[in-house]
Image (tube, grey):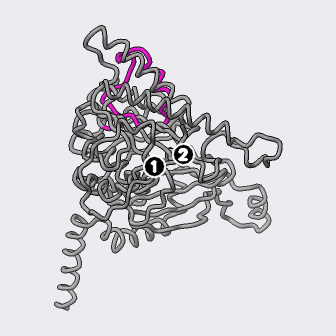
Amino acid sequence: MTELLLFIGGLVVFALIVRVKAPAVYWVLFGLPAALYRVFSSYRQTMEACELTVAPPWWKVFARKLSAGEQQARPGIPKVRGIRPTSTGLRIRLRLAAGLAPDDVVKSAERLRHAWGVYSVHVAEIKPGVVELRLTGFDVLDRVRMPRRLAAGPLSATVAVCEDGRPYVRDYKAKPHGLTLGANHSGKSMYQRCLIKDLAKQEVALVGIDCKRGVEQAPFAPRLTALAITPDQADGLLDALIEEMESRFDLLCLYQGIDGGTPLEDITSDIWGLPRNLRPVPIVVLIDEIAELFLITTREDTARRDRMVTQLVRLAQLARAVGIYLEVCGQRFGSELGKGATALRAQLTNRVVHRCNDKQSADMGLGDVNELAVLAATSIRPERAGTAIAGDSSGHWTRIRTPKTSLGEVSGLCYRFAHLTPRIPTLEPFRPQAAIPMQDSTPAPVEAPSTS
């Protein structure tokens, strides 16, 4: 008896320690079995209490009357069509009863969370009539742990974890241009580091514009095809990008495949339909502080500012088809910056907003996405650096948080993959002078297909 009590006491102490130090381990060992028991032992009662029921079909009512049963036909509830445990929670796929809508389940998510004793419940529509409940057993954004197996495809980067435990993937093919906003120490720089960390391993040209004398992006110089560290350099670099864009359009028109002998499925309107040996390398332009390109101190700066803004708007409107993508960062980005700011912001589909000092800043990034997303962005606590609200033009939004990534870690990775840095003739004047890579055996840079 004494040994049994000691064992139980030791197990309780172990569970309490693991719950604090390793919540994922605690969930797998203790939380998951308990959650499964609560879900299956009270599923029907919970659905009825949360009003996720519909009237029983007529044939069930008729059958009850014929059988002279005393009990009435029970109301219809969503049917479980699949269940999948994960390291952070539980996935339950439901087939909705006729008459229920996904919004009905969304409205009951908070009640389901309390009924089943989990940290959060998120609802996602899989297809008409089928939804997935994504239960999390603990706060996955408290200490971010990226999944070991990342399924990001080409020209995409896994940069954060969503609040339902899924990885957040920044896919440039799906959402070509993006805007990242946030106050100082909110996590914008960490988000950009995570982007570069993933993109540096791919066949893509990275172009940096960092008007803070390059303090944020200069450590990544070995992996940058071009870098501008002053507004004057940024002016010239944007002109070079426009020249590169126009030459790529000429290439696309030349090999588009609209002559009579080309199969219809081979006709293309972007570079991804070109043969691989003709396809130019994609370019991701990372702008660290967009306001520095808009602000002016003298009247002479006005012409330069207007020219840069015009070039940025042209890139945002046209460059997707030729594989040039914008990733714009800033603290504020609204009409007060000057002419063209609103037009540029409207082209930036992917929105990521970190902690803001005022509601107006959050509204700049998420006001046209969802009002609830704006409120969520203004409620991020200062000690939760790296937490952000990610949304897009579809109205969908979610909380995300980037893992802590040091500047030295990303800089070392850029040295390691420096041999993947393509040389683009039009951008060659802006190629940064990088230090000698750590390993002398690094292969020579890869020549990108010329489009000039």
- Segment tinted magenta in the rendering: 327-354
Tell me if 385 is positioned left or right of 258 in this view. Answer: left
Side of 339 relative to 280 (left or right) = left
Residue 439 in picture, x, y percent from top left: 26, 63
In x, y percent, where is residue 234?
35, 28
- Tag in front: 2 or 1: 2
Query: Amino acid under label 1?
Result: Val
Q: Is residue 112 visible?
A: no
Residue 344 part of the magenta segment: yes
> 46 above or below 255?
below
Q: Does the magenta stretch include residue 296?
A: no
Give coordinates of residue 244: x percent, y percent: 50, 34
What residue sits 34% from the left and 53% below the top? 197
The answer to whether residue 234 of the structure is visible from this angle is: yes
Q: Which of 227 and 370 is in front in this view?
A: 227
Q: Mark 2 points at which residue?
A: 280
Q: Name the residue under label 1.
A: 204
As rendered, which of 238 and 104 lies closer to the eye? 238
Q: Nearer the viewer, residue 347 or 302?
A: 302
Quarter of the image with the C terminus is: top right
* Quarter-of-image position of residue 305: top left
Question: On screen, 47 above or below 27?
Answer: above
Question: Residue 88, located in which quarter of the rendered image?
Answer: bottom left
Give the alpha-carbon distance from disc 2 to disc 1, as whole Å.
10 Å
Quadrant for the N terminus, please.
bottom left
Other residues around mark 1 within 10 Å, as few (<14) / some (14–19) / many (≥20) = many
Residue contact at pointers 2 and 1, CB within 8 angstroms: no
Determine the residue positioned at 46% across, 24% down. 311
Question: Which residue is painted at 75% across and 49% down in the image?
Answer: 265
Amino acid type, residue under disc 2 in the picture: Pro
* Picture coordinates of residue 224, whole percent (x, y): 35, 45
